[in-house]
Image (cartoon, helix red, strand yellow):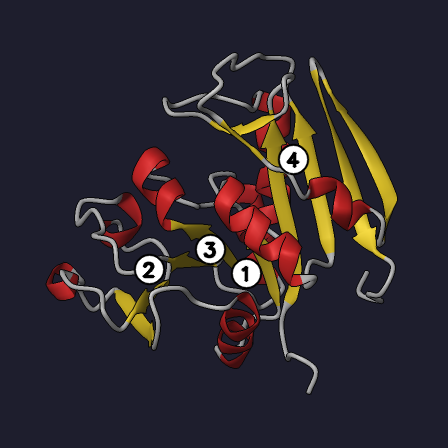
Amino acid sequence: MKTRKPHIILKLAMSADGYLDNEEPFLFSNEKDSTAVQKIRGEVDAILVGSNTLRNDDPSLLIKDPSIVIERVKKGLTPQPKRVVLCGASPLNPNAKLFNDGMAETIVFRSVNAKGDEFFTDLVKVKTYSSDRCRIDELCESIYQLGIRILLVEGGASLATQFIESGLVDSLRIAYSPKLIQNKRATKILTANSILASMHLHKIEYLNDMYAQTYRSNQTSTE
């Protein structure tokens, strides 16, 4: 049976030497790229990150441009996209921004074996799955059942790899930074080229000292 899923946009940012993650905080983006990402966030129902991104970056996953928020409301959307976190049984930071700011609905998918959820408030919905690792197709089905039809995946290399290997990505945006990480312990994504064989180049954005390429699946008809 075909997986019911939202339209999935996978967003990656890559250093000049091909890394997606670093052991230390690393700013891949510039102001023009950040503005472009804000516009993408304005078009989606939810944003998904993994536990590594949550732990390392503590993102708010919010739209910060008031004009984009206003346009969402005019379209009948919520002011902010839902925020979705995928994690296994590892502990979460109770002080993370998205657990405490009350700015958008937040949904956490956790292993049934996870402990330490007592800090979650009514602002956070917790969904559990039966193993320590959630299958991406099952996650997407669950997200679809929550009424989410367009999903932006902003996780790091681990989450991106899982989505690429699932074959469920509809759109892939890769932003290329001119900066070098030069850390052999940083993370490269090894499967990115495999997905491009089933996609076509949709557009190129020139973002001052950066550029971004957006690819779309040859199988999807969503504009």
Mark on residue 88? 2
Q: Nearer the viewer, mark 4 or mark 2?
A: 2
Q: Position of residue 41 (x, y in %)?
A: 57, 48
Tell me the residue that label 3 is attached to. 80
* Near-viewer residue (183 or 108): 183
Q: Earlier in the sequence, mark 4 or mark 3?
A: 4
Between the C-alphas of marks 1 and 2, the distance is: 34 Å
Between the C-alphas of marks 4 and 3, the distance is: 16 Å
Mark on residue 73? 1
Q: Position of residue 216 (x, y in %)?
A: 81, 52
Q: Nearer the viewer, mark 4 or mark 1?
A: 4
Quadrant, the C terminus? bottom right
Dot 2 alpha-carbon crowd within 10 angstroms: few under 14, some 14 to 19, many 20 or more? many
Q: Amino acid at mark 3?
A: Gln
Residue 206 vs 138, above or below: the answer is above
- In the image, taking residue 202 as reference, residue 207 lies left or right, namely left
* Near-viewer residue (222 or 35): 222
Q: Position of residue 30 (x, y in %)?
A: 58, 20
Mark on residue 85? none
Dot 3 alpha-carbon crowd within 10 angstroms: few under 14, some 14 to 19, many 20 or more? many
Please tell me whether mark 1 sits on a helix, a strand or a loop.
helix
- In the image, taking residue 102 as reference, residue 75 lies left or right, namely right
Between the C-alphas of marks 4 and 2, the distance is: 31 Å
Q: Amino acid at mark 2?
A: Gly
